[in-house]
Amino acid sequence: MKKFCFLIAVLLTLTGCSSVEVERYRAQRPVLDLRTYFDGQLDAQGIFQDRSGEVIRRFHVAIDARWVGNVGTLDERFTYADGTTQRRVWTVTRLGDGRYSGRADDVVGEAQGEAAGNALRWRYVMALPVDGRVWNVDFDDWMYLMDDRVMLNRSVMSKWGIRLGEVTLSFTKRIP
């Protein structure tokens, strides 16, 4: 049992050390400004893949985003391939120095974000209903601004340091 606990501790330590810092992207262009990009109407197409890589869910998200000063509201309306729908409303606060915080009804506590260059790292815990139970799952989102209209998002979901799957999104900003 001691060997098993030691192995788990080593694996969790290695997983925690393998993360890229957002600062690495500081020189990348175009520069991501959440207040500019997430302002107006956006669409996103996405998939959820389990640990094996199998696509479990496909979805579309219609986003209405507005900012008043340093506080933004992102009203997200999800439509899944099976016809089910979901709504999530984020309140995002720009803290300065490339840092952001955010809240949504199904987010446990507060999301923390850090932006540099064209990238944003957004971390939070989400309460996900699964088979009649609710699991608090860690999300580690990376968003990369490609141009003034397109942003890519890859999110790794984990529980107790164990990777559960990934969410991949492509955001497209509607240009009026």
Image (cartoon, rainbow, N blue to C red):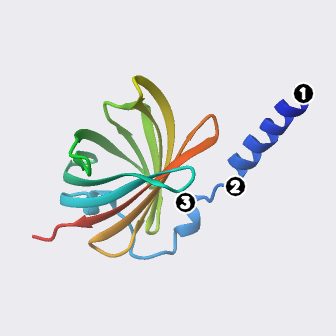
158 sits to left or right of 76: right
Label 3 Cα neighbours within 10 Å, binned few <14 / some 14-19 / many ≥20: some
**Residue 138 in the image: x percent, y percent?**
52, 39
Q: Viewer-nearest of labels 3 and 1?
A: 1
**Residue 148 in the image: x percent, y percent?**
28, 73
The circle on residue 172 is none
Q: Residue at x 21, y 58 (%)?
A: 39
Specify the quadrant that holds the C terminus: bottom left
Q: Amino acid at mark 2?
A: Ser
State how far apart marks 2 and 1 are (Cα).
24 Å
Residue 173 lies in quadrant: bottom left
Q: Which residue is mark 1?
A: 2
Q: Earlier in the sequence, mark 3 or mark 1?
A: 1
- Front-most of residues 27 and 161: 161
Residue 156 visible to an observer of this rendering: no
Residue 92 visible to an observer of this rendering: yes
Question: Is residue 135 placed above or below 9 in the rendered structure?
Answer: above
Find the residue positioned furthest to the top: 133
Q: Which residue is mark 2?
A: 18
Residue 118 lies in quadrant: bottom left
Q: Which residue is mark 3?
A: 22
40 sits to left or right of 33: left
